[in-house]
Amino acid sequence: MRLRTGWRKGAAAAALFVVAATAYAHDGAQRFMVAAAHPLAVDAGVSVLKLGGTSVDAAVAVQLVLGLVEPESSGIGGGAFLLHWSEKERRVRSYDGREAAPLAASADRFLRPDGMPMEFLEAAVGGRSVGVPGVIRLLELAHLRHGRLRWAELFQYAIFAAEEGFVMTPRLHAALGRERFLRDDPAARRLYYGEDGRPKPVGARIVNPEYGATLRAIAFGGAEAFYFGEIAEDLVRAVRGHAKPGDLTLVDLARYRALERKPVCARYRAQRVCGMGPPSSGGVTLLQILGVLERTDFHRAAPNSARAAHLFSEAGRLAYADRARYIADPRYAPVPVAGLLEPAYLGARAKLIGERSMGTAQPGTPRGALAWADAPDLAPTGTTHFSIVDSRGDAVAMTSSIETIFGSRILVRGFLLNNQLTDFAFEPESGGRPAANRVAPGKRPRSSMAPTLVLGPDGRLAMAIGSPGGPSIINYVAKTLVAALDWGLDLQSAIALPNLGSENGPTLIERGSVYELLGRELAARGHAVEVRPLASGLHGVERVRGGWRGGADPRREGVARGD
């Protein structure tokens, strides 16, 4: 089997310069659409779709390129969740490629000898935080079920860009400049930094032949080439040989499997919204926010008003409170999904919202709930999202992550390893109760990733959307949905709308946005307002008359393009 080379000539120029986000208008397309966080990744996806590939074929190519050009956010050393829409079957499927803890992992993994939890970066940097990567197994499973083009053919775009080079973007350059630990890794220092220890300049050509060689091996050997053999051995050696070693083994890699799980779906107004179930909290918490809002007078509040912001933030408090207590890997902790989404339960939660902020919401007691300890989040993450619709009307919404920006800061064979195990609860119990999201052997940590599909009243796909942003992902997606579904904005305008909401702490407002004008009135309603950068990376596709329209977040470097 040989890699196709026809793409090389047509893409050579694209591989060597950065296309500005404004270069592609976010307008309509009749046949297909790709929206992702980097123009080269979109180019790869569009090329696959032009060859007759499916949305999943395109997703493989897009993810592999993103792992090269956006290494701070995702890659084959991390994990992902994927939603798939089959137009023919009118069916949503969801696939779990979340990382897993090593078999040697114990509940006290992130406790110091004195029993106190580690500081976040103390735990995140190094081998202790690395879980078994799931992206390649996820892509393999989805491609087996829904792909059309040859697996090896989908790797050519990323291989070429890795071996010929891509251009350092302002966003990657800025992330490298802020980063404190990555340059301590010799391979990463050679790849991304100059002899003076500073990041290579914007516009510099970054060549990563090791990543290209890794992809060649997986292209011809399948996922087995990643989870067994030399790649697996190097990965384990890098984790266990780090100055802060982990306990990952070849057995952990060999036993990992991606899973198909039942999606979580619920009505919102006239639409049906579907998301990823546990171990992601994204789908359940998003549906709770929407379900609570639907049971208030949110629909009567003026768009972008303090009243709307108040109701949106209070709904978020209630949903995030339940999330912190109940959501975890369902294999290890029963999650009361049905109870959390019951209309009667959501109605009772909605009645807790008054004219003044409740400050901190308490978790409810849904049907089927057990008495767990709360496990709040510790830090935002480095993640990416892309949405794709193919010429058959089939779609993918995929959110992918290596957790914190640059993950564990371990570069092996051209790709960075995740630090996803820090998404577990650092304190295994509190107040005499165990945390549902505590560490356990083989367990998958709770996630906030929220790839989302919206089905219209006719039962057909209306929208695919998602975002990076750590625990804020859920609020970012919820904001976009209410802006589109309640306020009638087109998808691009809904994405660009300022971000806001609460994660059951202060009411967050995006710095530099017009929503800062709402701060005084929200404070008068009892909100503790905090203005901060809320850098979403929303990428979506919506159905319009005659085809599709894409949207890309102006806060990042992504684009949307189709044909």
Image (tube, helix red, strand yellow):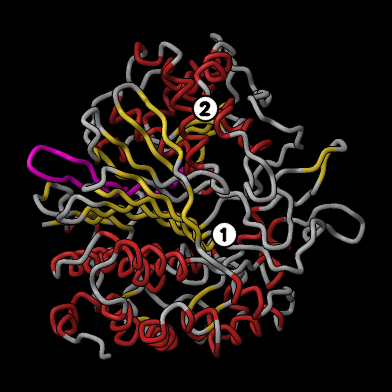
Quarter holding the C terminus is bottom left
**Tag 1: Cα neighbours inside 10 Å, few (<14), some, or many (≥20)?**
many
Query: Does dot 2 land on a helix, a strand or a loop?
Result: loop
**Tag 2: Cα neighbours inside 10 Å, few (<14), some, or many (≥20)?**
many
Residue at the image position 64 percent from the left and 22 percent from the top: 359
Residue at the image position 34 percent from the left and 66 percent from the top: 143
Which stretch is magenta?
A: 533-553
Q: Position of residue 302 (x, y in %)?
A: 33, 15
Q: Which of 340 and 534 is in front in this view?
A: 340
Q: Where is residue 126 in the image (x, y as percent from the top left)?
A: 68, 71
478 is within the stretch colored magenta: no
- Distance, label 1 to label 2, CA atoms, is 30 Å
Question: What residue sits right under mark 1 in the picture?
Answer: 404
Check the image and report above or below for 437 versus 50: above
Left or right of 174, for residue 524? right
The disc placed on residue 341 is 2
Disc 1 residue type?
Answer: Thr
In the picture as drawn, the residue positioned furthest to the right comes out as 114
Check the image and report above or below for 374 versus 136: above
Q: Quadrant of residue 498?
A: top left
Residue at the image position 75 percent from the left and 36 percent from the top: 372
Quarter holding the N terminus is bottom left
